[in-house]
Amino acid sequence: MAALAWMRPPTTAALATRNLVAVKSRVMSPRVHGRIFPETESSALLRRELRILVDLRTIGRETVAHLVELDVLRHYLQDLRPEPCRVTLLAPAANPELRAQYEVFTRLGGETLSYGSVVLPEVSNALGGVPDDFVALMSTAVAADADLVVTEAVPSGVDSQEVRGKLHVAFVDWPTVKRECEIFVRGHEVPWSFACPSWYCPWTPFYSIAEPDTTLIRLWERAGAAGMPPDTLELMRSLALNRHAALSYTRDKLLFYVQQERAAKRHKLHLQDFAFEIGYFLNHYYVLLWAGLDQINWIVNAAFNLEFRTKDWRRVGTLNKDFLRRMRERAQRVADIYEDSDFVRWVKMLAGARHFVAHGGFSMPTELYIRSGDDPSDDNWTRR
């Protein structure tokens, strides 16, 4: 498909820049009550609209249910006053071959773009060598300022992470786009789950209802039936309900700011990387995980009668030699899990991060650079 000369329609431009502004239209700083206020360039606040481009070739009898669920969420957000955020479904310009799909899409709240065959040079260069229809789809996504593209027509050999890194647009399937919507609205403090949709659900019971940790809950129930001590049962209850909910909420906040960061990069907002927000929840995540391990250790101590007491708290630890030795003596299968090399490596990384944020400083996200084996070294630098 040949590249077409293209100009974004004004209405689309207005939509695309509603929350993130790549180029400031104001030539002077804001002036209110006779006072001039500073304005940060190349930055913006939270994006409150999640824009989803739908490849209508994915719509069939088995996928209409997903559109219905998304439309339910859209109705719920519109019922909230003021509307905290918005989920917008978009489709490329009408294709006569997909008339039935367009009718379903528009009936369920979707919006049709006025274009659909554009090919942007930056997209073509980024994707290079893939079929023209996929280049056109991704070009339409970039032109429409879409955060996500729902499609099943991904050419073989296309690396989703590479495309996301270059274009800052993710292409996903229907279950994933619903998960992304959950993350987006939860990030705007709207508890919502497609598994159990409910108006005005508070956070306190939300995760226990929406995505309960059934394994931990079952353990807690069986321990109660077996007559475990009350203090151990309370540890299990807190782990299964409170700890699980806190970890899930923090996880969703981290994923929400990853979404926000991706949109900011797409708009070249170089001074807005959401590093503080991500760092804040990341630091909290480390502490929550480490405390959860402590709870598990005390539950194991009680369940297998390792006989450590409160005064021995320094000896009850995931990597503690005394704790592991006594566990090997009384619960070898559990000790095998604790001493698994992958688990030990993860615990050591978590320990380093947790101890740093608890006692030494504030952990912040940063760019990672992976060197290849052909990078110049100190030895050969002067010869180049």
Image (cartoon, rainbow, N blue to C red):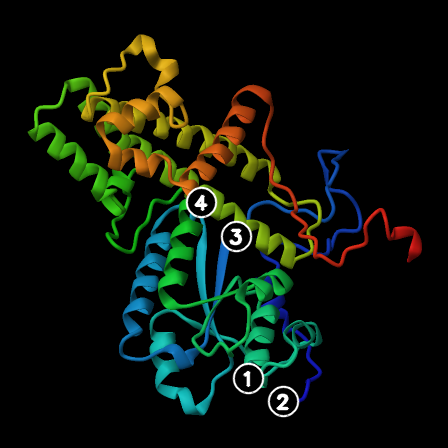
Type of the residue with mark 4: Gly
Check disc 3 and report the residue beneath it.
Answer: 259
Q: Earlier in the sequence, mark 3 or mark 4?
A: 4
> Disc 1, disc 2: CB below 8 Å?
yes
Q: Nearer the viewer, residue 16 or 356?
A: 356
- Mark 2 Cα shell of 10 Å, populated few (<14), some (14-19), many (≥20): few
Question: Whole-Å distance between the Cαs marked 2 and 3?
Answer: 31 Å
Could you tell me if residue 172 is visible in this image? yes
Type of the residue with mark 3: Gln
- Mark 1 Cα shell of 10 Å, populated few (<14), some (14-19), many (≥20): some
Q: Earlier in the sequence, mark 1 or mark 4?
A: 1
Check disc 2 and report the residue beneath it.
Answer: 1
Question: Whole-Å distance between the Cαs marked 3 and 1?
Answer: 26 Å
Question: Whole-Å distance between the Cαs marked 3 and 4?
Answer: 10 Å
Q: Is residue 109 left or right of residue 236?
A: right
Above or below — where is 355 with respect to 142? above
Above or below — where is 195 with respect to 152? above
Could you tell me if residue 47 is visible in this image? no
Closer to us: mark 3 or mark 4? 3
Check disc 4 and report the residue beneath it.
Answer: 187
> Disc 3, disc 4: CB below 8 Å?
yes
Question: Whole-Å distance between the Cαs marked 1 and 4?
Answer: 34 Å
Look at 37% across and 60% down and name the residue there.
178
Q: Earlier in the sequence, mark 2 or mark 3?
A: 2
